[in-house]
Image (cartoon, helix red, strand yellow):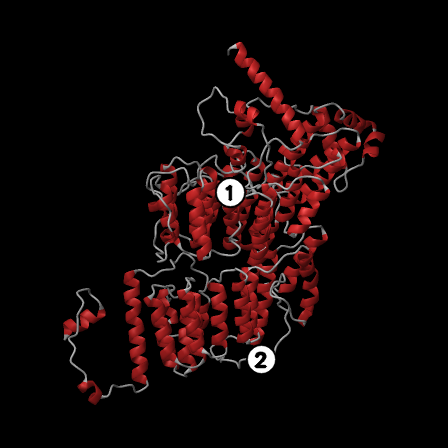
Amino acid sequence: MPWRAGRDLRHLYHAAHALLERSRVPLRPICLIAKPIHSTRVSWSPAVALKLKHSHTAVQPERTVEDLQLIPLHDLDVESVLLRWKRPKEIQPPPHILAVLEDVFKRYRTRLPALEQLRGSPATAELVTYLRIPQRAPALVHHLLDVREPRHALWIIRIAVQGGYSFSPKFYGRVSEKLADMHKWRLIPSLTDLAREDLGYTTTGLLNWRLQALMESQHHFSLQDVLDLYAREHVRVSRLTYHLLIAMHLRNHDLTTALAVVRAMESAGISVSPRTWAVILLNHRSLGLSPSAKAQALDALQAADGQTATTILNSLVQLLLDAHDMSGAVDVLSMASVPSAGHLSDHGAGTTRRDDANPGSALSSPRGVLINVTTYNILLNYLARQGDLARSLQTLEQMDGAAILPNDATAAALVRLYYATDSPNDALHIVADALRNHPAAAALLPDLGFTASMPAKYPTYPNAAVPTIGLFNSLITGVLRSSGLAALKTVLRIMRIVKVDANAATLAILMSHLNRREKSRPREMIRAVRALMSIGLPPTTRHLHVLMAALLREERAIAHPRGWSAGPVAEQTSLRPFTAGSCFEPAAGVVFPRRLRYRNLMRPILQSLTDRGVRSDRVTFAMRIKHDAVVKCDLEMALTTFKTMVAAGIQPNEYHYGALIEGHTAVGDMRGAVDIMRKATEAGARINVKTHTMIIAGFARLGQPTHAVEAFRRMVGEGIRPDVPAIDALVSAFFRAKAYRMARRALLQLWPQVAPMSDELEKASLRQLAVAFRALHGANTKVPERLSSQEQRMLRWKIRDILRRWKSAQGYSRDKAERAHRPARHRHVSLARTPEYTRAKRC
């Protein structure tokens, strides 16, 4: 290089280094959109910023420091863009120091020693001396973090600080970043406190790390409390601070406070940018997608560019899929995939639902820069929940065609998909690939049913998977469904070997299995959550959801005994209200029963959530509505709760409407139930087989088989496949009307829609048939949710036959005089070979 150019670069190095030292913030900005959502804004002078753009490498798109905050760390080397100097080589701790540390950790497993204890022992005094050498303590800390020992790393920092070593703010920022990558959010507040003690001051970056860690642990603070904290520490409030506050309140389902933070940000002179909308959309899942939010998202997508536009696009697709609007997601992806798509209008939201829409078709056009691996992961996760293997494979083909490499999130989604589609060996191939550097852990996979000699039938993407908690949570979900609790111990042993700790989501998965599959008592799950609280792990809203579902199941079983003989109950009048708390409390104001001391057992869990400022969410609101409408039979209170939720900005879904429908059917108000289902359809809520089953069961309780059959026929007409509860509800309508022979005939005719029937059951009694049929519920999970056209046609013929036989048994006949006055109609005979075609041909 010319001498003058080399001199300029040396001057640039020193100028940038001096600026960094004066800013007292960590150098490496962290991605705001892709977790961890943290960054530090550095203000460059115009002269230095101009020189920083100089490079002898290939020409890159021009980026500002603000833009760098939105680029994931794995996609960008921040130093190469900002300063373009080489980071000094990491110093490796010597083996004898690592041996001393290993001995200390073995001797002090529960409580690590203090500095005085280390100095007093000849075997550990060398460690104290080593930590005083410059650059040795940071190198040892980073080594412990790289081998996934965060608790020991923080102990080394504390011992070094007590011994007189002073770390830089940049070092604390890098350690916070690594802790966030490992999802060790509970350790970051302790680290920032230690940094405050070591430096004598704090920085905006460290306070932002602390704020994000508290948010991830579901600690929520008001805007004024955060502003007062930054003022006491004499640091400025950055754009990122406001973005973190917006994300915090949106996650806490507090739209009003989130909008107040936006107004406060604008009052502070920080304008709303596309990055702000990216943060809003990224954390808007807890509220649901409203028409206004959708329109603003499309406008922000048009104005944004680069990683910001990608984040907005992915968040919008996720919100549309949460609403089961696959056609809307496909339309948005189609327009975003074509660079010349022009303005993205609201028509891309897909007002007409097409459940058979193929996401691969939206991604088959020329790729734009907006679609990345996260887009495909969102689609794969949704299709995995649907158990749709065919469209998932098409999506993988499109990802391969776009030359987009899968990541660890893709591997976790595929594990979930293959377990849902009864391909566990393929899922275990992915797990085995993630354990390629851990032979002791991989040796335990045969205990889960893994056969290494059997090749995978579907794509597994070697070398893409790494042992993360997301991968193991997907594995736990699959093995619990296929093998039950017996295989859980094996997965936990594997996690201990690879040093991956279970998190709150792991416990929530286990509790959900115990509630749905094992039908465990609520007392057992409450004790499990309180046991975690005793070791310092706070409960989360997901734990509360499972506990409330288990308690609500018991209460509903007592208030409304199930069975073919059960009838409607009387609606509670407003003269007999029940005691309830505020709808915005963690449990949405549901008062737990005193029976079996459930109220006392739940009190510490609710108090922990209340002390952290946690508010009720969509799930707890749905349970409150069901508690009001079904358990207490107070439809007026249930409707009031529903309106309160909507006024708070939370969009209702099929569960909220389903709770209202079930409440109306419980008291025998079928006209109100049908009206609620009509309003749900108009609002865009997903009407599934469970919703139709509520209507059928409501007519059955009233002993109205004709209306029950008509409701069943409407469900089939919409292409929804009936399941065991739907058919059981229809049969119970004939049983309730004491038409036992008709009930048996209907059950025998509709049985093949669920599973083949054995020959020995053909002569069984109605009671034996009902017991055997109910045992099929949940056994066949591979049946598609929608009916094919041929299945739909055959099922309509069976329903028509059942209805005709029932009306004939009731003595139903048309009045000949009335039929004579009607104009003659020419019967249309279809060319398809249907039962009508056969009968017409015989005539």
Secondary element at tag 2: loop
Of the numbered discs 2 and 1, the one sitting upstream in the chain is 1
Disc number placed over residue 574 in the picture, else none: 2
Within-10-Å neighbours for mark 1: few <14, some 14–19, many 20+: many
As drawn, the residue found furthest toward the bottom would be: 817
Query: Visible in this render: residue 841?
Result: yes
Q: Is residue 691 left or right of residue 102?
A: left
Mark 2–mark 1 distance (CA, rounded to whole Å): 49 Å
* Residue 323: quarter of image: bottom left
* Residue 82: quarter of image: top right
Q: Is residue 82 left or right of residue 790?
A: right
Within-10-Å neighbours for mark 2: few <14, some 14–19, many 20+: few
Q: Amino acid at mark 2?
A: Ser
| Position in image of residue 237 (x %, y %) | 64, 42
Look at 36% across and 49% down and name the residue there: 331
Vertical side of 288 occupied by 726: above or below: below
| Position in image of residue 733 (x %, y %) | 41, 78
- In-front residue for pair 826/325: 325
Vertical side of 523 occupied by 566: above or below: below
The residue beneath circle 1 is 275
| Position in image of residue 310 (x %, y %) | 45, 41
Look at 81% across and 32% down and name the residue there: 118
Vertical side of 621 occupied by 440: above or below: above
Q: Is residue 615 left or right of residue 282?
A: right
* Residue 340: quarter of image: top left
Q: How many marks?
A: 2
